[in-house]
Image: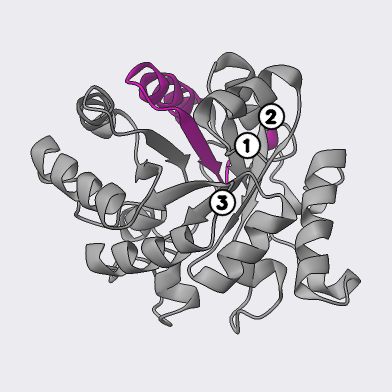
Amino acid sequence: MKPVTIVSLVAMKNAGDKITSLTAYDYSFANLLDRAGIEVIIVGDSLGMVLQGHDNTLPVTLNDMIYHSACVARGCQRALIVVDMPFMTYHVNREQALVNAGRLMQEGRAHMVKIEGGTEIVDTVRFLTERGVPVCGHVGLTPQAVHQLGGYKVQGRDTESAERLRSEARAVQDAGAGLLVLEAIPLGLAKSISAELAIPTIGIGAGPSCDGQVLVLQDILGIYPRPSPKFSKNFMRESDSIKGAVKAFIAAVRDGTFPGPEHSFQDR
């Protein structure tokens, strides 16, 4: 099968075909997801919680991400590998961001880096993409700002914050981002943002109208020892194998049965 690229993901969006994505952090799981047909594997800084046992993603280092990204890359032949830039690796200045993104691509073999934020990271996104670094944006609930946000809370529920998120999504796209993750925002807002943008949106807790869906692998397998978020689903409950759970996730995203109303946040 041909490798998944940004161009093929845009073609899927334009055709109305749903994009499937899961996190992975090692060779074995990456290979399983790749063979199952997942389009996008995100090497998330969520590894700080599900692998390292931290309360949030902030302790994750650049070297952590490079190590896990390289492991994932060795397991993939087809999927697009998107790797999180961890906390404080792109915040000081855009030159720092370029050096660190370069390491993720050269040493970690990432195909694309992911950066959280809105207007404050637009200049960095433009600087990276103009120099050949593909960027995935991430707006809404941004886990690296958990302390600033006061916890893992739904974003964009009032008119002012919804318009801010809509404006930030457009700005990140216009700066050159090729993908955009929408996390924990009302489903109506996510639907309108997805319709307005030319680039694909990948939702996590953003309702069924995003161009694709992503979940944390440990959540869909039911093996994370702490409570999973409302927007997740344990697909192992209806499967007899890990591969079966992954296949069930893919099928549910593609036929529109996931996420359901119980996994989405309603507009107020």
- Looking at the picture, which amino acid does disc 2 mark? Gly
Task: Give the labeled residue for mark 1.
Answer: 2
**Would you say residue 131 is visible in this rendering?**
yes
The magenta span reads 160-187
Q: Earlier in the sequence, mark 1 or mark 3?
A: 1
Distance (Cα) linking label 1 and label 3: 9 Å
Say which element carries label 2: helix
Tell me if mark 2 has few (under 14), some (14-19) or many (20+) residues whose alpha carbon lies within 10 angstroms of its own.
some
- Looking at the picture, which amino acid does disc 3 mark? Gln
Q: How many marks?
A: 3
Q: Earlier in the sequence, mark 1 or mark 2?
A: 1
In this view, the residue farthest toward the front is 1
Task: Give the labeled residue for mark 3.
Answer: 77
Residue 95 screen position, x and y as percent: 9, 38
Quarter containing the C terminus: top right
Residue 141 screen position, x and y as percent: 47, 48
Tell me if mark 3 has few (under 14), some (14-19) or many (20+) residues whose alpha carbon lies within 10 angstroms of its own.
some
Numbered label attached to residue 188: 2
